Structures are given as C-alpha cells and as structure tokens.
Image (cartoon, rainbow, N blue to C red):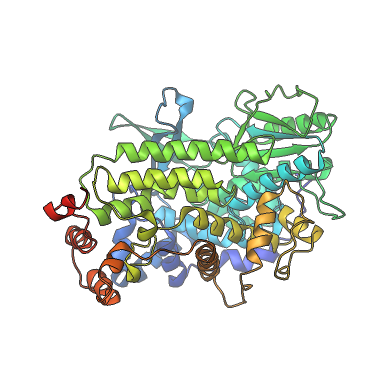
Amino acid sequence: MQYITPTDPQKYAEHLEKPITTDEVYRAIRAGARRKTPGIDGICLEFYITHWTLIQVDLTQLLNEMFLNKRITVQQKQGILICLPKTQQSSTPDSYRPITLLNTEYKLLARIMATRLKPILAEQLSTGQYCGIPGRSIFDALATVRDVIAYHETTRTPLCLISLDFQQAFDLISHEYLFQVLERYGISQWYVERLQAMYEQMNTLIQINSTLVGPIAISSGIRQGCPLSMCLYAMCLHPLVRFLEESLPGIKIGRQHLKTTIIAYADDVSLFVTDPTNFTTVRHAINTYEKANGARLNPLKSNALAIAGWENPTTPLDIPFNDRIDILGVTFGPTIALSRADSWSRIIRDVRAQARKSYARTLCLEQRIQYVIVCLLARIWFIAQILMPTRAHAQQITTACRWYIWQASIFRVPITTLQRPKHEGGWNLPNIELKCKTLLYNRIQINGTTDGTVMAQLFHTWDIRTLIPNPPQMNRILKKLEHLQQYTKDMAYIPPPTQNDSRHTVKRRIYSTLIQLYKNENPESEMRITRKKPIVIWKRVWQNLHNNGLTAPIKSAWYAAINDILPTHDRLTEIH
C-alpha cells in the first residue's frame, strides 16, 4: 500500500456519488455488446435497446435504487459460470476460461460505475498499465514490447523479457485487499460501500453439460464478464507495478529521462530486466503481492526470453527460458525478424485452415468476397498493427483468399480487379499488403505522438515527430528498426492529420495515398472486358449493378455475365 499515493476522498466524491442520469444509462446500453448470452433472468441487451423510449424512466429509477440505496437482491447478483475452451484441443481444466453470465441490469450498473472510475485510473495508474484506462489499448502494450526488443537488438544491450502468469488471477483476489486499495486511491467510503453491496452475498450457478449446478457462494475474486472487473483488477495490480517501476532500472532510450520497466494488460504482466541482480527485487515484490491479495505466480506457465546476448539462462524465479514467448496473442522472438516470421507464419496457417473449413459452403461470388473480408482477413488486422508482414507473407494470404473466392472456376477475374472500387468494376477487396501498412503506420503515429511511450522516445531521438521533407532521409534510422524506416519513407508523402481529423479519416488518407503510390510504380492494366467493349459506358454499368437492390446471388451472376467469365460454349471455344 505504501506505493499508492494517498488521495483525499473528497477529490472524486462529487463525480462518483452523483445520481445516475438517463443519459448515463443510455450510453451504457449503447456501449454493451449485442447478441450476447443473457444472465439467469433471460433478458438480453436488445430488449432494452428496442424498448428504450418506453422503459427509460423506470430503468433509470431501478438503477438508482440499486446504486444510491444499495437495494440489490441476491437474484440480481446471481450469475451463471460457463467454461469456454481456450484452444480447439482443450482437455484439462486449465485450458478453459471461466466466464460469468450476469443479468443485464446488473451489468448496466457495473458499466456506469466503471465509466466513472476510468478517469481516476487514467490519473492514478502507472504508464505501464494499459487495460481499462482511457487512451491506452492492447496495441500500445504490444508496440512497447516490439520497440524495446528492436532497440536492444539494435544497440546489442542484453535484456531479459519475462512474461508472468498468475494462476487464477481474477478468482483469487481478496475482497478485503480490493476495498483497502480503493480507499487508498481516494475512492470515498460511500462509493466503496456500493461496490461492497455488489460483491457481498454473491453466488453463482455452474453450467455443466447444459445442466445448472449450485448455487455456490463466492467469497473472493472478481467476475470475468463483469464490466467492472478490468478496472478493479488494474487498481489491485497497481501496487506491484509501482513497486517494480521504482525499484528496477528499466530501459531508457537515448538521453530521455523516461524509463520502461513493466507492461501490464489485465493479468498479462511482462517485465524488462537489464541486470541479473534485479531478480531478487522481482521475487521480493511478487512474494509481497501474493501475501497481500491472494495471488499465486505459476512459474511453469511463465516464460523468459533472452535478447541481445543475455548470458544468464536461469532465474531465481524458476521461470524457464524459451526461444519464443507469447504476449497478448503475438509471438515474440529475440529479434524482430524472427518475431515477424513466427507470428505471420502462424496467421497464414490459420487463414488457410479457415478457408479449407469453409470451402464447401454454398455461397455466391459476393458472399465469398464478404466472407474473406469479414472472417478470413479479420484474423490478420490485429497483428498487422504490431508487426509488418513481408511481401511474401501478403502474397501467401492473397493466394489463399483467391483460392477460396474462385474455388474450381475455370474463368475468373484477376485479384487486382476485385481490389478496384465497385464503381470501377471491382468489389472493394482490400490490398492486403497496403492495408497492413496502413494499420501499422496509424498505430506508429498514435504511439509516436503520445508522450511517455517508447515510440515517442524513438521519434524524439531521430527527430521525426514532424514529417521529414520529401524525399525522406532514412539513413539516420537504424536498420533493425525496419518498421520505423518504412514509416518514415512512406509517411513523407502523406499529409499530416489536422485537429478535426478522426482516426478513421487518417487511416483512409494513408491507405488511399499508399494505393496511389503503388499504382504509380505498378500501372494498372485495362480490364479485359472494357478493352473488349470500349464503347460501353462502364461506369453506369457498375452503378446499375450495385445500386439496384439486387440480391447477392443475382448480382454475382450478372457480374460473371458482364465480365464474360461464365463457361458458355462460345467462351470455352475461345480456349482452343
């Protein structure tokens, strides 16, 4: 507790204790995820959305009764515990993730209370914590890991990266410790009592093979599935993060005074150790944290990675060293090149497996293209914001998509045609390589202009906070920082964002500019059908095809007919 700066409870009292307004309830409803399994009362979020105008007054009064007067019944707090497999080959209890299904009105209250806590988290918590804090995301955490590895690879400074795994991290948190931490942060006793009302006399039913067992009383832990969980866990973890930040030397870029020591996203905690003597401090910090809140480190599931010639293969924590380490769904190796190769090879295997699994589905051309965009390519956009694929990686994914779209068709339209806009005869299929670059550059720009990040320190070191004059001068940036070199090269041609630009607008501008640069280097060839029939007003043809409300199968059939790719007798004769 000594690493939490005491705060006057009156500082946040007015913000936390005010009655719930109708606007807060409406925002909480809109922020909820649709098509989710409801709690034991069977009322889903869609009910509140559909009947909002009818129930808004009553619902606001109900939530205020629960919040202001602590009138929360045991039935309202009761949840259903289900276990979701973490992998397709889940066969042990540890390979399942427990999720609690909660009643919607309980989740609405929890979401409103979490929303009120988030500004306090942004003010109080360390820069190394990323979950549940406004302005920080999982991508910022992963980008920090990538940039630290790249920097140490470049400077050849030994580094040990440790990924800590806390066994049943959410389930073992002591409620007594939780409420003491909240009061230390300056959360008023009045507000803490409302949180206690949500946690006291909790019980849950357990779903086993479609049968409900229980109820079972819950005396510790915070529920995975509750909107409050991430905020509360981040506050419980903060004393450990703060202790390690103050005790370890951390990593400094250039002459910057800021240092990076720890990355924490929910229960995923990663440490950067630069000196073997630091392990004693780490062990002491973890032991103290375990005694305080009931957490337990699992050394067998924790991992360590040696970077840039780290020569101490063992740690006093009994954490094994590995050639690769998985952090928040991304595989990292001792170099960025290995990290990129491993991560993208896994993604390519997943895309191919998903394409094979869905190959036999009866879908028309438009539906197959939509499946590629919505399902197959959705797997790659996450990692694309961290590690840039090589051209070979992008080509392999494109080949898998082309194979799925056309299947066994004799005649087909080139993939470059499908990547054209609809008004030019295409289907808006994204250029995978350029879309990945767009997402990466957007993330680099966000991190580089945010004070306190490793990327901001790299921007300052090479003076690239503002765009480098065209043509760009990349030679001063170290070769190992390939993603930063490429960013500097391409972003020199892209206008800087203005204050009124949304991130969506910025991404569209980056993508359209990259497309234009690509076309300048690789001029588009004229479509076969437009070359064959030049007198047709093709712009009107494509507009009629996409704007007349045709069903997907009819539209696909017309597209095939217009492009003359149907296996008619005349078309087959042309082969000979």
- Horizontal relation, residue 300 to residue 512: left or right: right
Q: Quadrant of residue 362?
A: top left
Q: Is residue 185 visible to us here?
A: yes
Q: Is residue 149 above or below residue 310?
A: below
Q: Is residue 194 left or right of residue 446?
A: left
Between residue 311 and residue 342, name the one nearer to us. Answer: 342
Q: Is residue 74 visible?
A: no
Residue drawn at point x = 62 percent, y = 31 percent: 324
Q: Nearer the viewer, residue 113 or 350?
A: 350
The residue depicted at 39 percent of the width and 38 percent of the height is 352
Residue 234 in picture, x, y percent from top left: 62, 47
Question: Looking at the figure, which quarter contains the N terminus?
Answer: top right
User: For the view shown, which residue lies furthest in the left direction?
Assistant: 569
User: Where residue 13 sits in the image (x, y, percent)?
Assistant: 64, 65
**Left or right of 439: which side holds 6?**
right
Single out the residue that lies furthest toward the right: 255
In the foreground, 365 or 334: 365
Residue shown at 42% from the left, 53% from the top: 106
Asked if residue 284 lies left or right of residue 447, the reply is: right
